[in-house]
Amino acid sequence: MNDFVYYNNTKLIYGKGVENQIGDNIKQLGFKNILIVYGQNSVVQSGLLDRVKSSLSASGLKFVEFGGVVANPTKTHMLQGVEISRQQKVDFVLGVGGGSVLDEAKAIAIGAVNDDVWSFFERENKPKLNKCLPIGAMLTLPATGSENSTATVIRDEKTGFKASFGHDLMRPVLAFVNPQLMFTLPKVQIANGASDMLAHMMERYFSPQTDVVATDYLLKAGMQAVFEIAPKLYRDNHNYQLWNEFCLLGTVAHNGMLSLGRTEQDWGTHNIENLYLSGTHNIAHGTGLAITFTAWLKYMSNKRPNKILQFAKEVMGATGNTDREIMDSGIANLVSFYKSIDLPISMADVGIDYKQVNSQVNNHYNSQSRVGAYGQLNDADIKAIFELAK
C-alpha cells in the first residue's frame, strides 16, 4: 500500500426535492453568475430545469443556459460552452444531468479560465492546471460518479478519439442527488449505469500491487452490492430506497475512496473501450464496458491469472476443481449478471463489425507505449481481446 493524500471537497446533498436547495447553497459560497449546462429534452420536459432556475432566481443569482449536450460529449459543443462562459463572465458552472453533462461542464469550467482547453486533453505534454471555475452537479443519472470525481472525458467527433483529463480542481464543490428523479429513466440506463460503476471498481481492483487488502475488501463489498441491487432495481425502478443505494454506489465507485493507497490501477479496459467502441461507434459507454471487460477477463485469465483467480473466488463466489474451472466459473457468473439486466456481451450483440474494429488497432500501443497496469496491453493483446469479444 502506497502513501497517499486524499482531498474531497464535495458537499453531497442527497434527498427528495434537493434541487430546490441549489440556489441557497451556491449563494452561501459567494457565487453570483451561473452557467447551467444540460442535455437534450428530459430535464426540460420533466420540469427539473425550471425548478433549478427558480431556485437560482429565488436566491438572487443570475444565470445563462447552455443546453444540447449529447451522450459521449463532443469537443465542438464543449468549445461553444467555453465561449459562452467567457462572454457572460460566469463564475460558477452547474451541470444538470448525467455523466456526459457533468463531463462537459467540467471541461467548460477549465476552458472558461484557461487558453486552449483541448491542450489539457492531449495524450502528451499536457499543461499544468492551476485554475478552474468551481463546479456544481445536479445528478439525473447515476453511473459515472462524475458528481464527486476529478475526471472528465470529451470526444473529438472528427477523429472519434475520447480524451480524458483529471485534476482535483475539477471535483464539484456541490452535488445534489434526488433519487426520485430517476424513476422515469429507461431500464437500459440502469443497466449501463450498473456496468459503468462496476467497471470503476474493477479497474481499481485489478491492480498489480500487493498489500492492498483493505481496499480489496472495500471493492469486493461495493461490487457485490452492485450485483445485489442492480437486478432488483431493474425489475422495480420506482423503488426509492433502491435508487438511493444505487446512486450512492455510483458516487463511491469513482470518488477515489476505494483506490486509496493503490497508485497502480489498471484502466486498460476503459481506455480501449473509449478508443475503439464508444469513441468510434458511439455506443453507450456502459454497454462497451460489459463487452470489453468480459473479453479482457478471459484473455487475462491465461496471461496473468493470479488476480483473476482471486476475483473469481472472492468476488464472484466461484468454485471448481482446478484454477481454470474456478476462473471460467467466475467469468460465467459475471456474464450471468450482465445478462440479468439485458446487457450485451459481444460486439455482434450491438451490430459492430469485429473486423472493422480490429483493423483500427494499429500503432496505438506498442512495446514502448502500453495501456493498463495489471494487463499492460499492446496492440497484439488488444486484437486478441477483441477476438474474444466479437
Image (spheres, grey):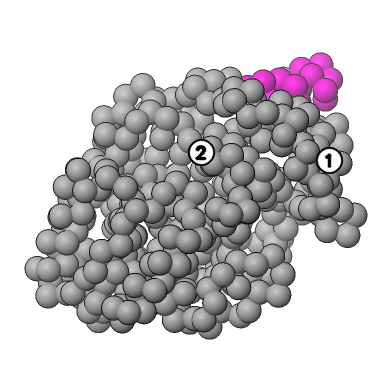
Q: What span is colored magenta in the figure?
A: 320-334
Tell me which amino acid carries mark 2: Ala
Picture residue at 56% right of the left edge, 66% below the top: 166
Picture residue at 40% right of the left edge, 45% below the top: 142
Q: Nearer the viewer, residue 18 or 60?
A: 60
Would residue 218 appear left or right of 61 to someone viewing this image? right
Q: Which residue is mark 1?
A: 381
- Say which quadrant the C terminus sits in: top right
Would residue 50 appear left or right of 155 to someone viewing this image? left
**Crowding near pointer 1: few (<14 within 10 Å), some, many (20+)?**
many
Q: Nearer the viewer, residue 250 or 280?
A: 280
Whether tag 2 and tag 1 are in contact, CB under 8 A, the answer is no
Q: Name above or below for residue 229 compared with residue 102.
A: above
In the image, which disc is placed on residue 79?
A: none
The Cα–Cα distance between marks 2 and 1, rounded to whole angstroms, is 23 Å
- Number of residue marks: 2
Looking at marks 2 and 1 on the same chain, the residue that comes earlier in the sequence is marked by 2
Picture residue at 47% right of the left edge, 74% below the top: 110
Residue 229 seen in render: no
Would residue 304 appear left or right of 343 to someone viewing this image? right
Picture coordinates of residue 84, whole percent (x, y) = 34, 72
Picture coordinates of residue 99, whole percent (x, y) = 43, 51
Tell me which amino acid carries mark 1: Asp
Q: Nearer the viewer, residue 382 or 374?
A: 382
In the image, which disc is placed on residue 284?
A: 2
Q: Main secondary structure of the magenta part?
A: helix
| Quadrant of residue 92 within the rendered picture | bottom left
Picture coordinates of residue 308, whole percent (x, y) = 75, 35
